[in-house]
Image: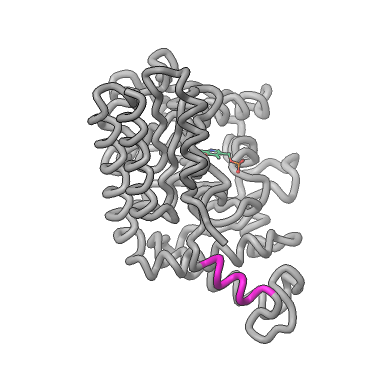
Amino acid sequence: MTRAWNFSAGPAALPEEVLHQAQEELLDWHGAGCSVMEMSHRGKEFMSILAQAEADLRELMGIPEHYKVLFLQGGATQQFAQIPLNLLAGRSADYIVTGSWSKKAFKEAQRVVANAGTVRCAASTEESGFTRLPTAEEIKLDPFAAYLHVCTNETIHGVEIPAERIADTGVPLVADMSSHILSRPVPVEKFGLIYAGAQKNIGPSGVTLVIIHRDLLGMAPLTVPTLMDYAVMAENGSMLNTPPTFSIYIAGLVFQWLKRQGGLAGMAAINAVKAEMLYDCIDGSDGFYTNPVAADCRSRMNVPFTLADARLDAVFLDEAKAAGLLGLKGHKSVGGMRASLYNAVSVEAVRVLIEFMNDFAKSNG
Ligand SMILES: *Cc1c(COP(=O)(O)O)cnc(C)c1O
């Protein structure tokens, strides 16, 4: 068996230790006589898995008591609708558009609110090709907005909001953290709601994490489907219906793995090293490779880059695959390449990637 170096944007690499543990426990979880996939979600075994996963996540992220942690379904994409449906309450919301994902969130909010409220674009960097963050002067906030929505890491464009630029604006801050949650410490109390699909940095697809301040619960109008009402899901411990049990179980194993890596501070230090290695390789390639993103907001998780000669793209990908490097094709909307350096991607994997990139540039430059 050979496992390749996996740079997929999502579903993405999982820690090998976690996969081994899941394999060992697959047929008989802790003497239960069946796998986690085959047990009742209301039995004491699964209830303990869920409780442990939540406790470990709370410890890792330092989530205060007055926030609820929900394990939902529908992906981050369902949150694009569920957030305005729950939180608008006939008011207006602001969106900062910094890439494909925040643009999708903005469009979906416009779609679901119809006449019930309004949705404003408070700033957009689309005209500069989503390669930078808006300046403070460019952001036009509504002080009466029900919430302000941001995407703190744009997975496709490789734009990340540095932690120190997350400021209090006086309205609840709602953040799509799908592609960099758990990659660095997060000041949870600055946010009203944090959400993330699992398949980048948490675990397998199928579970969506929502961390919500209790003041934002109970605002949904009665027309909102029961399953999409945050308050109902919170009251029922994310178990109004059958939750994605296996995804939650694997996410729980990932949380324990993260604790063994030194928690989020430990992970952030490793992630900084990986990102610096790859950006140095790109910037030091004399233009053979280019990353278009402004230096102050380059993503540590998703690194898009292009080759000066796009005719070499297919050769690059073929040779990368032959060298055991997977998932490097860029998103179709931006072209070129993208290397995703999520938590489970090791420093060693990045070293192998850089060696390949340097060799490729030498042979083809
Ligand atoms: C992947 C991704 C999404 C979409 O997630 P799904 O779980 O597929 O709905 C949304 N936002 C960001 C930032 C993403 O990276």
**Residue 25 at what x, y percent from top left?**
63, 76
Residue toward you, 25 or 127: 25
* Residue drawn at the location 33% of the way across and 36% of the way down: 359
Residue farthest to the bottom, as pictured: 31
Q: Let me know if residue 37 is in the magenta part.
A: no
Asked if residue 136 is positioned above or below residue 66 in the image, the reply reads: above
Q: In which quadrant of the rendered view does residue 141 lie?
A: top left
Q: In which quadrant of the rendered view does residue 86 lie?
A: top right
Q: Which residues are magenta?
A: 18-26
Q: How is the image coloured?
A: one colour
**Residue 352 at what x, y percent from top left?**
36, 48
Magenta segment's dominant SS is helix
Asked if residue 242 is positioned above or below residue 108 in the image, the reply reads: below
Residue toward you, 343 or 20: 20
* Residue drawn at the location 49% of the way across and 22% of the way down: 334
Left or right position of 267 against 69: left
